[in-house]
Image (cartoon, rainbow, N blue to C red):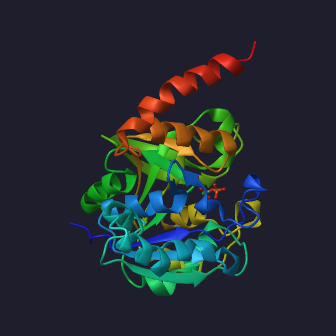
Amino acid sequence: MAQTIRKVVFPVAGLGTRFLPATKAVPKEMLPVVDRPLIQWAIEEAAAAGCTEFIFVTSPHKRAILEHFSPAPAYEEVLTARGKDDQLALLQAGLPETAKITEVYQDQPLGLGHAIWCAHEAVGDEPFAVILPDDMVLHKTGCLSQMVKQYEEVGGNLVAVETVPREHTSRYGVLNPGAETGPLVEVKGLVEKPSPEAAPSTLAIIGRYILDPSVMEDLSQFNKGAGGEIQITDTLARLIGSLPLHGFRFDGRRYDCGNRAGFLAANLAYALSPNGAGDQSDLGENLRPMLQSIIDAYSAT
Ligand code: G1P
């Protein structure tokens, strides 16, 4: 059985230009989906998968992310005095009590592979998870916990995958798939952001990875790939043959919060689904008729 996954890396140094002006002073990972920021949903998913060490690859202008996970004495004092225990619990921001937080800086936007490499000292010599908070997966126990279970059986490198429309392949790392066993797809090759014509399939990587620490050595060569960036996809492709690489078709619905429509859809889905902000039972009930009337009022004619 493969090693347990304790550490998770969140590459969150990017500028989030697609959400300007909202992201001028607020990091995109701090944009809320229903009642908590994207990064908190990601942390909760990692905690549900058993992770206890949370490594942020960030940049100095994104202090708000770390502040969100720091103690808030002013709130604590007021809420304690008012006896508001429910609200006090919310200040924990989804972090387990034993959580360890590490922050490393990515000083240049050299790509996702480079961002992951920036965490090499914090990761050390053990397998680790990577979550891209932009990709949300709405599922009762989250996507990463499903992956951890599979990883315990197969080890190596594991990436979450889903089928995408062929016209979208140039947004993703795309698999050249081999044999399939249940939800696992053997990977024979990988291409980062291929054109629809060149894509070897329509099976794309979404933002969840479980990686062997040996990826760091390959990443440290700083080889540039698609878009002139250092790509984790290329590293994973190069390691095929020396390490097993599988795609994992997860259960749950994925929302791409890296674009406005996906972000708004995630807000609605997380509000309406019992697996989203489901503890607030009146939310869906109140929202449903409002949503219907909005659709009625603004449907294209
Ligand atoms: C990154 C990866 C890509 C993956 C995608 C998932 O791309 O490079 O392989 O398919 O995340 O969201 P990005 O969205 O950062 O351009």
Query: How many callouts does the rendering have?
Result: 0
Residue at the image position 38 percent from the left and 83 percent from the top: 125
| Ligand 1's quadrant | bottom right
Residue at the image position 56 percent from the left and 27 percent from the top: 291
Residue at the image position 47 percent from the left and 77 percent from the top: 72
Q: Is 208 placed above or below 113 here?
A: above
**Residue 157 visible in the current orientation:** no
107 relative to 245 in the view: left or right: right
Q: Nearer the viewer, residue 205 or 94?
A: 94
Position of residue 25 measured from the top left corner of the image (x, y, whole percent): 73, 67
Quadrant that contains the C terminus: top right
Q: Quadrant of residue 7?
A: bottom left
Q: Quadrant of residue 57?
A: bottom right
**Residue 238 visible in the current orientation:** yes
Quadrant that contains the N terminus: bottom left
8 relative to 163 in the view: left or right: left
Q: Quadrant of residue 96?
A: bottom left
133 relative to 144 in the view: left or right: right
Position of residue 232 measured from the top left corner of the image (x, y, whole percent): 57, 65
Going by the picture, which residue comes out furthest to the left?
A: 1
Position of residue 192 measured from the top left corner of the image (x, y, whole percent): 64, 54
Going by the picture, which residue comes out furthest to the bottom?
A: 121
Q: Nearer the viewer, residue 57 or 25?
A: 25
Position of residue 137 measured from the top left corner of the image (x, y, whole percent): 45, 47
Going by the picture, which residue comes out furthest to the top?
A: 301
